[in-house]
Image: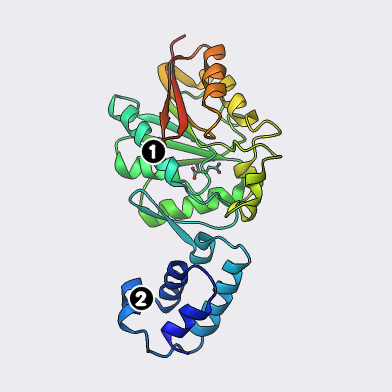
């Protein structure tokens, strides 16, 4: 079978088929356009067919490729971690603004693949990053990403702040699970394949956020910031929650599509 025929017969999105075939053949996607009539032999033929079938069955492209690009990084991902999202790239931008105004000690809560911590560290090497996750396999994925990028982050196994003692940071940043357990979105796109622990914030969707807002002040220096990603319809609830806890200068920011998808506040005891 030729390159062109394989792509045509994959019965998945054409661009995704091209990305998967290029990955299997170890070539750039552009190469395929000049080699449409080249035959594809085993084992690439079988591997591509398996990947295309899995994709048709709902396996996320990122898990099939084993990576997802996030800001300037190519991050290894697997079924134990959330696939890094473009929205979170904005959260990193906000975190970097805080680092640039003096917040050098940064804590990433629920780091998953390590996306936030690693992007902050690569883009601002003078920052000191600590990142926690309660899933050992996720931490292993994050550590492997740190090794291949050659950057130093302190990785700790902890359920939110539980194992962190009395340590304090200048900035706490998190993309916590914030989808309601009954939300129909959980059945759509890549979400059914991703770990519930990375997605579901209890029945209301806000349970993890409320927990983080409640406990962050114990771990922030005076003047420190908390930045949280959340759902497109949760900004008002997150603002109210941070106000109740006594945060100041609370504001929300919008993502690429104009939705208010992150909220931050400053801790001034
Ligand atoms: N911090 C990681 C990310 O933003 C994982 C977040 C999560 O698992 N909810 O991609």
Where is residue 257 drawn, in percent x and y? 41, 40
Q: Residues within 10 Å of mark 2 (few under 14, many from 20)?
A: few
The one of 203 and 82 positioned closer to us in this rendering: 203
Q: Camera-side residue: 226 or 192?
A: 192
Q: Residue at x 49, y 67 (%)?
A: 13
Quarter of image, res 133? top right
Residue at horizontal 55 percent and vertical 17 percent from the top: 240
At numbered mark 1, what does the secondary structure look like: helix, strand or loop?
helix
Residue at coordinates 51% horizontally, 26% vertically from top-left?
235
In this rendered view, identify the residue nearer to me: 164 or 18.
Answer: 18
- Disc count in the image? 2
Label 2 SS: loop
Mark 1, residues whose alpha carbon is within 10 Å: few (<14), some, or many (≥20)? some
Estimate the spatial distance between the alpha carbons at disc 2 and disc 1, rounded to whole Å.
31 Å
In percent of width and height, residue 137 lies at 59, 52
To which quarter of the image does residue 38 belong? bottom left
Residue 186 is tagged as none
For label 1, being within 8 Å of ligand 1 is answered no
Question: In the rendered view, does 25 fall on the left or right side of 77?
Answer: left
For disc 2, the marked residue is: 27
Q: Residue at x 44, y 41 (%)?
A: 88
Q: For residue 120, say whether it is visible.
A: yes
User: Colour mode?
Assistant: rainbow
Q: Is residue 6 above or below residue 88?
A: below
Report the disc number at residue 90. 1
């Amino acid at each position: 079978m030729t390159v062109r025929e394989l792509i045509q017969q994959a019965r998945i999105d054409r661009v995704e088929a091209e990305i998967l075939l290029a990955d299997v053949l170890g070539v750039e996607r552009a190469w395929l356009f000049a080699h449409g009539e080249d035959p594809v032999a085993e084992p690439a033929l079988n591997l591509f067919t398996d990947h295309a079938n899995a994709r048709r069955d709902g396996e996320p492209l990122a898990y099939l490729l084993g990576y997802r690009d996030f800001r300037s990084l190519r991050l290894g991902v697997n079924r134990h971690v959330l696939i890094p999202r473009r929205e979170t790239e904005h959260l990193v931008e906000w975190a970097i603004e805080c680092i640039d105004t003096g917040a050098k000690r940064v804590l990433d809560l629920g780091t998953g693949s390590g996306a936030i911590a690693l992007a902050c560290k690569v883009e601002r090497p003078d920052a000191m990053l600590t990142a926690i996750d309660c899933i050992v396999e996720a931490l292993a994925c994050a550590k492997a990403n740190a090794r291949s990028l050659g950057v130093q982050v302190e990785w700790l196994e902890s359920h939110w702040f539980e194992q962190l003692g009395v340590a304090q940071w200048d900035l706490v940043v998190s993309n916590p699970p914030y989808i309601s357990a009954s939300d129909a979105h959980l059945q759509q796109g890549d979400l059914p394949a991703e770990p519930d622990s990375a997605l579901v914030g209890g029945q209301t969707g806000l349970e993890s956020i409320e927990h983080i807002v409640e406990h962050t002040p114990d771990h922030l220096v005076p003047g420190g910031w908390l930045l949280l990603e959340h759902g497109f319809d949760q900004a008002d609830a997150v603002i109210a929650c941070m106000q109740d806890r006594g945060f100041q200068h609370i504001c929300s920011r919008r993502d690429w599509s104009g939705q208010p998808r992150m909220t931050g506040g400053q801790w001034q005891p």
